[in-house]
């Protein structure tokens, strides 16, 4: 390549531009989606559902899930942290090798790996047949960021001191998000449509019949409040005796017509004689964040969609519906941590490059030679980003760690060549072109040995298929791809960059400079030729 220096220099510049272009275009993510063999789920039912109906729906969900060939066991229970119309699911999948689906094609057998996300996607349609409830599944992850827990993996929270504005705009945003193709399983924790039966008392009639409010309170609590009336003692245990009406008389508000109260005269008086009930809506729960009322919308990602694409789509949807200034919206949990990492990622890489430049500048006592060494990094970045694109992976935190590691792994090729080239120039009096050529010949074998050792060491990370291997796979992919491409290019581009930058160094100094003459065998020195 030293015979075609201009062409090689153009290739080096194009590789640097390509690395920037690929960094902009590659999908961004936070942490890789793992298959840990565990799936969690949340059930959201109608807000006016009874506990008995909720239990029936949970059983139907369990029956549907257990029919899936990849599911090993299921545990579900009704009743959430804040409302009775919620439920929780925990599923254990069979080992990965037992989930594989194999088909015989011609004379060979082809097997497809069934991941936890594949199980969720094929169960999504089957679970939709249960009316009045929704089961949303998400794969359990080893690493979770943020303290929020929702029915889906990512959360978007609305906050407002005005509860009416919050109740108005949260459903609108949820409806808009359900139209976005980048999202799945959109749901809200807004619980403002519960039913209550409000007992209206005709106080004049009650007073005339000799019934006071205390008597009514005691009678209603005796019937529906589970009053403890006694304790049964046994040699090894004790049991509380709870009084209430039979369960079959507790299911409808019409049960109030069967309640009788004793008046001040001792005459039984039916409760329906001076009361009636009115149904109305009431919030089952009002969530708060930072002492401000909030509504959290949870969502999962569609297959093949990165978290960066989803957050951009949500922010665009928020702008289109025109939120009032009284409602504040922000990502929470993992999505919020992703946005923070995305904003600091370029600064992190730039800081690492500046640190390397300063250290190399002090080592070589030069402003130019560190640039020669850093010129090897764009090819490594191109290889890492191309490897992520070809394997359909995102640039996430683990991939970024791999790129930062590449800075240390790749620049050692240029360091070994430049060290030898500078030594040859100073001791043997050769020109930069001859010196860098000799350095490439002398350092070819150690460069290949160290690169292959690092590349082969990253292959198990890139090719691993064990449980949870998705977490470290981007690290191996970026290391292998970056080292492979950089090894193909840096042996050709680094000598050319060295020669051009050496010419720039001499031009900045105002002319040619003589190098130290080569010592002769008799201990005398001969003048060296000018560069």
Image (cartoon, rainbow, N blue to C red):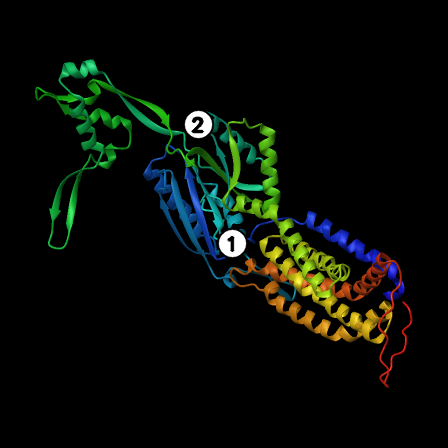
Task: Give the class, few, some or many, for how many residues have Cα within 10 Å of label 2's Cα (few <14, many ≥20).
Answer: some
Name the quadrant containing residue 390: bottom right
Q: Nearer the viewer, mark 1 or mark 2?
A: 2
Q: Position of residue 164 (x, y in %)?
A: 45, 25
Q: Which mark is residue 503?
A: none
Does residue 82 appear left or right of residue 213 in this picture? Answer: right
At x 80%, y 70%, the residue is: 421
Q: Quadrant of the N terminus?
A: bottom right
Is disc 1 in contact with disc 2, using a CB cutoff of under 8 Å?
no
Picture layout, residue 171 above or below residue 30: above
Q: Quadrant of the C terminus?
A: bottom right
Work out whether residue 305 can be spotted. no
Q: In front here: 171 or 123?
A: 171
At x 58%, y 37%, the residue is: 314
Q: Position of residue 506 (x, y in %)?
A: 85, 60
Residue reaching furthest to the front: 524
Residue reaching furthest to the bottom: 522
Q: In front here: 459 or 136?
A: 459
Name the residue beneath numbered marker 2. 163
Name the residue beneath numbered marker 1. 116
User: What number of labels is visible?
Assistant: 2
Work out whether residue 31 can be spotted. yes
At x 33%, y 24%, the residue is: 279
Name the quadrant containing residue 189: top left
Name the quadrant containing residue 391: bottom right
Which of the two labelled residues, at mark 1 and mark 2, occupies the earlier sequence position? 1
């Amino acid at each position: 390549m030293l015979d075609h220096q201009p062409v090689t220099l153009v290739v080096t510049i194009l590789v640097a531009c390509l690395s920037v272009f690929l960094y902009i275009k590659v999908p961004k993510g936070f942490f890789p989606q793992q298959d840990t063999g565990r799936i969690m789920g949340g059930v959201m039912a109608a807000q006016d559902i009874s506990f008995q109906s909720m239990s029936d729906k949970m059983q139907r969900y369990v029956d549907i899930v257990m029919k899936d060939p990849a599911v090993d066991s299921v545990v579900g229970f009704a009743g959430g942290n804040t409302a009775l119309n919620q439920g929780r699911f925990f599923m254990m999948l069979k080992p990965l090798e037992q989930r594989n689906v194999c088909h015989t094609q011609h004379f060979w057998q082809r097997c497809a790996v069934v991941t936890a996300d594949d199980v969720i996607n094929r169960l999504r349609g089957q679970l939709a047949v249960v009316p009045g409830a929704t089961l949303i599944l998400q794969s359990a992850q080893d690493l979770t960021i943020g303290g929020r827990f929702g029915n889906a993996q990512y959360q978007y929270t609305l906050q407002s001191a005005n509860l009416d504005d919050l109740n108005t705009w949260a459903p609108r945003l949820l409806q808009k998000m359900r139209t976005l193709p980048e999202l799945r399983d959109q749901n809200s924790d807004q619980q403002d449509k519960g039913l209550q039966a409000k007992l209206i008392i005709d106080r004049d009639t009650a007073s005339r019949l000799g019934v006071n409010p205390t008597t009514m309170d005691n009678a209603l609590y005796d019937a529906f409040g589970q009053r403890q009336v006694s304790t049964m003692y046994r040699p090894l245990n004790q049991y509380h005796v709870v009084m209430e009406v039979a369960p079959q008389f507790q299911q409808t508000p019409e049960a109030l017509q069967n309640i009788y109260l004793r008046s001040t005269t001792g005459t039984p008086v039916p409760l329906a004689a001076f009361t009636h009930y009115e149904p109305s809506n009431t919030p089952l729960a009002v969530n708060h964040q930072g002492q401000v009322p909030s509504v959290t919308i949870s969502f999962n990602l569609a297959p093949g969609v990165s978290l960066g694409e989803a957050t951009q789509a949500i922010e665009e949807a928020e702008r289109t519906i025109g939120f009032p200034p009284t409602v504040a919206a922000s990502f929470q949990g993992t999505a919020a941590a992703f946005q923070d990492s995305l904003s600091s990622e370029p600064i992190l890489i730039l800081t690492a490059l500046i640190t390397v430049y300063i250290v190399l500048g002090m080592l070589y006592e030069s402003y130019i030679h560190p640039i020669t060494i850093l010129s090897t990094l764009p090819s490594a970045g191109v290889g890492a980003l191309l490897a992520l694109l070809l394997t359909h992976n995102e640039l996430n935190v683990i991939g970024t760690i791999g790129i930062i590691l590449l800075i240390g792994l790749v620049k050692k090729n240029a360091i070994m060549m430049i060290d030898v080239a500078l030594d040859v120039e100073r001791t043997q009096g050769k020109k930069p072109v001859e010196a860098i050529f000799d350095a490439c010949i002398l350092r070819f074998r150690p460069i290949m040995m160290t690169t292959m050792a690092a590349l082969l060491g990253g292959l198990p990370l890139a090719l691993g298929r064990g449980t949870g291997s998705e977490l470290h796979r981007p690290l191996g992919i970026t290391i292998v791809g970056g080292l492979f491409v950089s090894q193909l290019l840096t042996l050709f581009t680094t000598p050319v960059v060295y020669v051009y930058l050496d010419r720039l160094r001499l031009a900045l100094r105002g002319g040619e400079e003589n190098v130290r003459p080569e010592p002769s065998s008799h201990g005398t020195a001969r003048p060296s030729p000018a560069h």
